[in-house]
Structures are given as structure tokens and as C-alpha cells.
Image: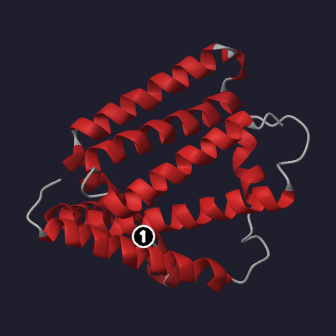
């Protein structure tokens, strides 16, 4: 495998994780721009590459264009992005409720299920929007801490294993390759959870200390 591109991907992931964990609220627009861009490029490349293989060399250009579009939307419509993020969490909560209590929803038609899910989306989205400072700090610290620890586990595993191995791997396969070298593969769950909790608390304290000084994001 060409080592340059995957290492660059890991460095970008690590930098974004640190930025999001400790300065997610301070640099909200910048972090959302970068995350939206790289997520847009990665997932559009992944989806279009498997769905429309005839794109050829146009695949990268289209993926970058989609990434830039999402990045600028996230940058200029931060409040809408925060509302949408809360709404997505509302849908996740709704999905958990359905899994825990399937009998409550087994007899419902698709339209009532859709309306209930939409209600969860709107209510949690509005709640998130109303308390966006606290939501952004909490979410960015926890998410950034998880991404930081996971990425660090991949980097450490990479050095311990002496690289990714041989062969050619497309960018759509990087997720599986990264996970294959992570030190958390065979480790107990607490080995991942404990450092995530530690970095999450450190990130929350850092971000609240910054906002307590009267500075604004």
C-alpha cells in the first residue's frame, strides 16, 4: 500500500479530533467546515465509487465539490447544523426506544412511525438549539475524545506492526485497514472507554474555562 495517503488521512483525523475535543466551541465554524468537508468527500467518494463506477477520473472532482458544498453550508448555517445534529440524535433515541420496546410500535403503520420519528427529530433539535453552547461543548468533547483515542490507537498499532502490510488499497477500504491495525482490536472495552472518559472530561473543562472568561466563539 502507498503509505503517504493513509498517513495523511490519519494526521488529518488526529488534528480534527484534537481541535474538536478541546476547541470545538471556540472554533465551531472552522471545525464544522473541516469535518463537513472531509466527511462529504469521503462518503461521497465511497458511495459514488460503488454506485456509479463509470465516473472514472471525475469521481474525485465530484467528491471534492460535494465536500466543499457541505463545508460551506455548515460554515454559514451553523445554527441550522446544530439543530440538525440534535435532530439526528433525536432519531437515534427514537431508534433505541423502538429496539427496547418493539411491542409499542409493532402495530403502527409507516406514516405514524414517520410522524413519531419526526417529532423526536424536531423536539430534540429544538432542545439542542436552545442550549447549543452546552450541547456543542459536551458533544464536541466526547466525540473529539473518542476520535482522538481511536486514531491514536491506529497510529500506535501502525508503528507496532511496522506498517499496513503490502498490496494496494483504495480509500474506500481505509476504514477496514485502519481498524485492522488498531491496538484496541483485542483489548478489553475499558481500555478504550477509560481514556475516552479522561479526554472527554479534559475537553469539557478546557472549553468551559475558555467560555467562563467571557470570550465568545
Front one among 88 and 146: 146
- Residue 181 in view, yes or no: no
Residue 26 seen from this side: yes
- Left/right placement of residue 159 relative to residue 51 reads right
Which residue is located at x 18 percent, y 60 percent? 129
Q: Quadrant of the N terminus?
A: top right
Residue 160 rendering spot, x and y as whole percentages:
81, 62
Q: In x, y percent, where is residue 173?
A: 75, 43
Direction from residue 26 to residue 166 in the image, left or right? right
Which of the 4 quarters of the picture holds residue 180?
bottom right
**Image: 165 above or below 105:** above
Residue drawn 39% across the image and 57% down it: 20
Outermost residue on the right side: it is 166
Foreground of the two, 59 or 89: 59
> Can you give x and y, in whole percent of width and height, for residue 28 in the image?
27, 50
Element marked by disc 1: helix
Picture residue at 32% right of the left edge, 58% below the top: 23
Residue 3 position by quadrant = top right
Q: Colour scheme used in the picture?
A: secondary structure
Crowd class of label 1 (few under 14; some 14 to 19; many from 20; radius 10 Å): many
Q: Is residue 168 above or below residue 211?
A: above
**Point 11% across, 67% down: residue:** 213
- In the image, is 104 to the left or to the right of 99? left
Residue holding disc 1: 142
Q: Nearer the viewer, residue 139 or 196?
A: 196
Tell me if residue 46 comes above or below residue 179 in the rendering.
above
Snapshot quadrant of residue 170? top right
Query: Is 197 located above or below residue 83 in the figure?
Result: below
Amino acid at each position: 500500500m502507498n503509505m503517504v495517503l493513509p498517513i495523511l488521512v490519519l494526521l488529518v483525523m488526529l488534528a480534527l479530533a484534537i481541535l474538536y475535543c478541546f476547541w470545538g466551541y471556540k472554533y465551531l465554524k472552522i471545525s464544522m467546515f473541516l469535518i463537513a468537508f472531509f466527511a462529504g468527500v469521503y462518503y461521497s467518494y465511497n458511495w459514488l465509487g460503488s454506485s456509479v463506477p463509470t465516473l472514472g477520473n471525475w469521481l474525485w472532482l465530484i467528491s471534492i465539490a460535494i465536500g466543499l458544498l457541505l463545508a460551506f453550508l455548515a460554515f454559514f448555517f451553523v445554527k441550522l447544523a446544530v439543530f440538525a445534529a440534535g435532530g439526528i440524535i433525536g432519531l437515534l433515541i427514537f431508534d433505541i426506544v423502538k429496539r427496547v420496546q418493539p411491542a409499542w410500535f409493532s402495530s403502527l403503520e409507516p406514516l405514524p412511525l414517520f410522524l413519531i420519528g419526526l417529532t423526536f427529530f424536531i423536539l430534540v433539535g429544538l432542545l439542542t438549539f436552545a442550549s447549543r453552547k452546552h450541547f456543542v461543548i459536551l458533544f464536541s468533547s466526547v466525540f473529539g475524545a473518542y476520535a482522538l483515542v481511536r486514531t491514536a490507537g491506529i497510529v500506535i498499532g501502525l508503528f507496532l506492526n511496522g506498517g499496513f502490510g503490502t498490496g494496494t488499497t483504495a480509500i474506500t477500504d481505509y476504514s477496514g485497514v485502519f481498524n485492522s491495525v488498531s491496538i484496541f482490536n483485542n483489548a478489553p472495552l475499558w481500555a478504550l472507554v477509560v481514556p475516552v472518559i479522561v479526554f472527554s472530561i479534559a475537553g469539557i473543562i478546557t472549553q468551559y474555562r475558555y467560555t467562563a472568561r467571557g470570550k465568545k466563539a
